[in-house]
Amino acid sequence: MIYVTSDLHGFPLSGLLRLLNLAGFTERDELIILGDVIDRNGDGGITLLRWMMDQPNVRMILGNHEAMMLSCSFLLDNITDRMLSQFDPLRMELLNTWLSNGAEPTLEALHDLQQKDPGAVRAIFSYLRKAPLSDIRRIRSRQFLLTHAGLGNFQPGRPIAAYTPDDLLWNRPSLDDIYFTDIFTVFGHTPTIAYGPAYADRMILTPTWADIDTGAASGRFPMLLRLDDMKPFYLSATIPS
């Protein structure tokens, strides 16, 4: 079985494990996380990332928050007075963009980890650099396209490889958007509640796509979708931190 979730944003690992247990997830199954593990809450998702890196059956699609983190990989350098004097406007802009999108808890956790185990921090960055922007999975006779944010600037005949990182990382679809009719697209990025209170805490399912971001960034619970039968799984009780 293949399960997908998205936009955990520092959600407690204990909560994710509880969600997986609720779905009956086993080592024979596969979990694909559609980006935005980091930022906003808790330790910024660093515990989640390190757990994911140790799981042979967990995969990750890059999210826009991880892309912002990678754009600030210069923070791994030793900070010296000389380096600070050469901190050019572009680096400042990249860092400010990430900070304005909830980077503070992630930066704090990375700083603490850097003091204890610099190699672990480098390994996290290496792991994220290898994360793809999309993935296609065939389950029986059905194909699924997995991305972080859907398909910006969608055109029916446009090959997936022609979509830019911004198309896949920052897109905000409208409810009436129609994607490929022969490949079902699953993504997160836009919390479902953003489409109105009627969509709060539940995935949005259309004929050609599903949005599975149920708002963990703002203190709600993430969900899990089993692609084999399109069954959703939801948490409904308080998760210990």
Image: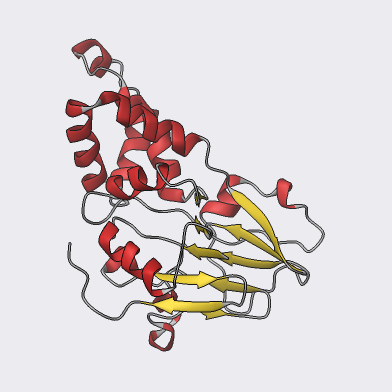
Toward the right, the furthest residue is 157
Q: From the image, which quarter does the C terminus lie in?
A: bottom left
> Is residue 222 in sight in this rendering?
no
Q: Quadrant of residue 84?
A: top left
> Is residue 50 in sight in this rendering?
yes
Q: Is residue 148 left or right of residue 38?
A: right
Residue 63 lies, with reference to residue 221, above or below; the image says above
Q: From the image, which quarter does the N terminus lie in?
A: bottom right
Residue 124 lies, with reference to residue 45, above or below; the image says above
User: Residue at horizontal 29%, vertical 57%?
Assistant: 13
- Residue 118: x percent and y percent? 27, 24
- Residue 64: x percent and y percent? 46, 49
User: Residue at horizontal 59%, vertical 62%?
Assistant: 150
Instruction: Give the colouring mode of the picture.
Output: secondary structure
User: Residue at horizontal 35%, vertical 25%?
Assistant: 74
Residue 55 lies, with reference to residue 121, above or below; the image says below
Instruction: Name the residue nearer the viewer: 154 or 40.
Output: 40
User: Residue at horizontal 52%, vertical 50%?
Assistant: 61
Toward the top, the furthest residue is 82
Q: Is residue 106 left or right of residue 28?
A: left
Q: Is residue 49 left or right of residue 228?
A: left
- Residue 189: x percent and y percent? 46, 62
Instruction: Name the residue nearer the viewer: 177 or 201.
Output: 201
